[in-house]
Amino acid sequence: MEKIIVEGGNKLEGELVVSGAKNAVLPLMAASILSGGVNSFTNVPDLADVRTMCKMLEILGARVEFEDGSLEIDTTDLNKWVAPYDLVKTMRASVLVLGPLTARFGRARVSLPGGCAIGERPIDQHLKGLQILGSEIEIEEGYVETVAPKLQGGVIPFDVSTVTGTENLILSSVLAEGETILLNAACEPEVTELGLVLNEMGADIQGIGTDIITINGVSELSPIKDHEVMPDRIEAGTLMIAAVLTGGDIFLTNCRFENMGALIGKLLEAGAEITRENGGIRIKSTGELKSIDFTTLPYPGFPTDMQAQMMTLMSIADGLSIITETIFPQRFLHAGELRRMGADIKLVGNSAVVRGVRHVSGAPIMASDLRASASLVLAGVAAEGKTEISRIYHLDRGYEKLDRKLETVGARIWREKE
Ligand code: EPU
């Protein structure tokens, strides 16, 4: 196992290229199951989660090649419909194969994802939707089993806005018979990307990007060719916070300003300077860092995947910040580690009250989940002294070489064997 060591205190300055989005490419890879042909993607980030999904597709019988950001998935001979526990337990997003396997084979057996560091994360809405489309569902030996010789369109009202739930039901219904209407659908840009790609493959989906999505089933889809995966708005946001935290100035390319409204708004309120330049985003510290309050919400609200990183920023801001987490009310494991670095954070129900301190100081700390890991790396970069972060395999699940990128713009950061 590896750990990350950071000697904090350097100003981060320079230019960085944002990688392709993890949460966009995973559902696109699942979509390739539906096409029965050779699908290809570019701008694919080299992440542990992407590798896990590659392995999953191979186990199902696909041929997968992944090199230098190019991914080819040939699902012509895909012939299995069981997603085993060993893979699902390492990545919850594996549940995205449930819909497409049911659509293609009329059945699927997918290990039920269990507990998770960031909260309960049930998949009841995925299952409710599949039942509405006519699938029988049983849970046996830790697996969800679906049987549906032919899925039929229906109206699916989601009780909560769910990203992978919406994606799974879009993937289930594109080949179903008749019309499916998703109500209270998730509007995240990654859901939009999936809808647009499926339409390019021959699907008939309307209302993409809104909370009412209408899908008219078609009889077949053709494979997608050379689709360039959208940039990762969470990685971009994490790098923006790195700039502000260190009093720095970073120019990001391959990112979409328009997908980051809530975060950009809050960073401006905190005192950062943000400009759109030559197709990229420049973020610059003004020397002033004010505490701000924010609440995580479904898109276009403030993303829960940026809550931990923003908490790190608020730890050294001027004043008192109240952070409310409405998506995963227990997603605060990073708070205890930040406290070990000298942050003043109190948890009250699903809120964190952060009183800014002058500085945080380096300490040995432990990563607990993906975004918490990123928040701790950021804290290390801003801290006085040396920080050692263990269990960083969480970071590699969803950030492509975050430590190397930070090093490029001036951080003193490296890996060592634990
Ligand atoms: N929920 C239910 N029932 C369901 C599904 C969800 O009650 O059947 C609840 C969840 O417990 C949660 C809320 O609905 O309270 C939203 O969860 P959602 O289903 O939207 O989360 P997800 O689809 O499992 C995706 C991202 C997460 C991100 C969340 C929220 C992927 C692969 N994962 O998860 O990303 O935090 O949406 O935006 O897209 C990450 O990248 O670090 C990450 C955790």
Image (spheres, rainbow, N blue to C red):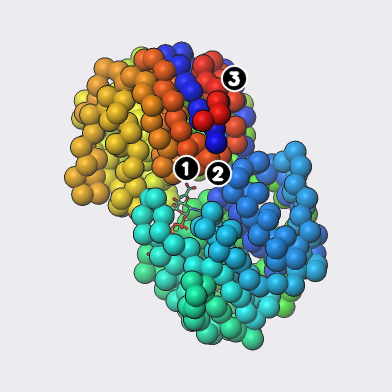
Residue kind at label 1, given as amino acid type = Leu
Residue depth check, mark 1 versus mark 3: number of the one nearer the observer: 1
* Label 2 CB less than 8 angstroms from ligand 1: yes
Q: Identify which residue is drawn at 66% across, 59% down.
A: 56
On the picture, is 322 further left or further right than 198?
left
Mark 1 neighbour class, 10 Å CA radius: few under 14, some 14 to 19, many 20 or more: many
**Residue identifier under label 1:** 370
Residue found 70% across the figure and 66% down from its top: 60
| Camera-side residue of 396 and 390 | 390
Please, what is the three-letter code of the amino acid marked with disc 3? Thr
Horizontal relation, residue 376 to residue 179: left or right: left
Residue under pointer 3: 408
Residue identified by numbered label 2: 397
Identify the image quadrant of residue 106.
bottom right
Kindly indicate whether the residue at mark 2 contacts the one at mark 1 (C-beta within 8 angstroms): yes
Describe residue 36's horizontal placement relative to residue 317 as left or right. Answer: right
CA separation, marks 1 and 3? Answer: 22 Å
**Residue 246 at x, y percent in the picture:** 42, 18
| Tag shown at residue 147 | none
Q: Residue at 40% of width from left, 35% of height from top?
A: 366
| Labels 2 & 3 near each other (Cβ < 8 A) | no
